[in-house]
Image: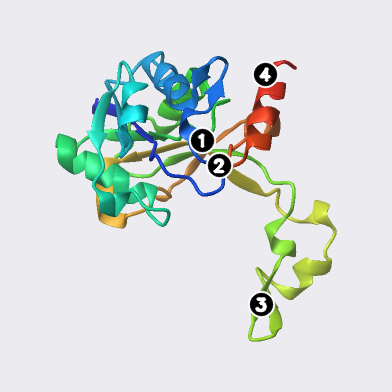
Amino acid sequence: MREVVAVITARGGSNGFPGKNLALFRGRPLVTHTVSTALETPGIGRVVVTTDDPEIASHSTGALVVTRPPALSGPESRSVDAVLHVVAELGVSDALLVLLQPTTPLRTSADITECLTLHDNRPTGSVIQMTTATHHPWKSCILHDGHITPAHDWPDLEAPRQSLPPPLRPTGGIYLVSAADLTTHHRFFIPEVRAQLIPADRAIDIDTPADLVRAHLSTST
């Protein structure tokens, strides 16, 4: 079996919700909560936090902290590049990687375990945590130079919703992929992609203070 490395991406800046990775959830900063979830998961060999923020690092007890360079710490920086930086820094090119974002705190260690089971140590392919989408993407349009085109096909825009394939969306909670696939393709969605499904009330991605309130309310139901 390959080593399984959990990588928690937690940069310091956030335009919409400053300091959100340190916002309190269940009495602990979001990054601390996520580190704890990863440490509780059987099969994970190492837990790594990639950050540019010393305060986030100080709240990452139990995890190995990898300091991001400024080029990977701006508002346009991509998670894939931060994770690949971890792969290079730690020399874990043969590992399975589990990307965990602090802003999806309702993800559980049982969810991560299910993703590892779904992956089944395949030589390639990824597992992504998903939930049901509330709006069908085939009923969307794209604007081009003042006119629209369908996201999928014209008839789908007027088709009964129940006649279309049930849509799913990523929660942002778990992306499982091999370091080799990530290095080769620079993306987390590697066919064959398998889905780990959770209910929508656990698929809250915190981008605003209101989202954090919703997450707290979800834990009390």
Residue at the spot of label 3 = 143
- Tell me which numbered mark, 3 or 1, is placed earlier along the sequence: 1
Residue at 57% over, 16% down = 26
- Tell me which numbered mark, 3 or 2, is placed earlier along the sequence: 2
- Tell me which numbered mark, 2 or 4, is placed earlier along the sequence: 2
Q: Position of residue 218 (x, y in %)?
A: 70, 23
Residue at 54% over, 32% down = 104
Could you tell whether 152 is left or right of 77 in the image? right
Indicate the quadrant where residue 210 lies. Answer: top right
Q: Position of residue 219 (x, y in %)?
A: 67, 18
133 or 161, nearer to the observer: 133
Q: Residues within 10 Å of mark 2 (few under 14, many from 20)?
A: some
Question: What amino acid is at disc 1?
Answer: Lys
How far apart are the two marked residues, 1 and 2, measured between alpha carbons? 5 Å
Residue at the spot of label 2 = 17
Residue 20's label in the rendered image is 1
- Tell me which numbered mark, 4 or 1, is placed earlier along the sequence: 1
Is the C-beta separation of discs 1 and 2 under 8 Å? yes
How far apart are the two marked residues, 4 and 1, measured between alpha carbons? 19 Å
Is the C-beta separation of discs 2 and 4 under 8 Å? no
The total of numbered circles placed on residues is 4
Residue at 71% over, 65% down = 140
The quadrant of the image that shows the N terminus is top left
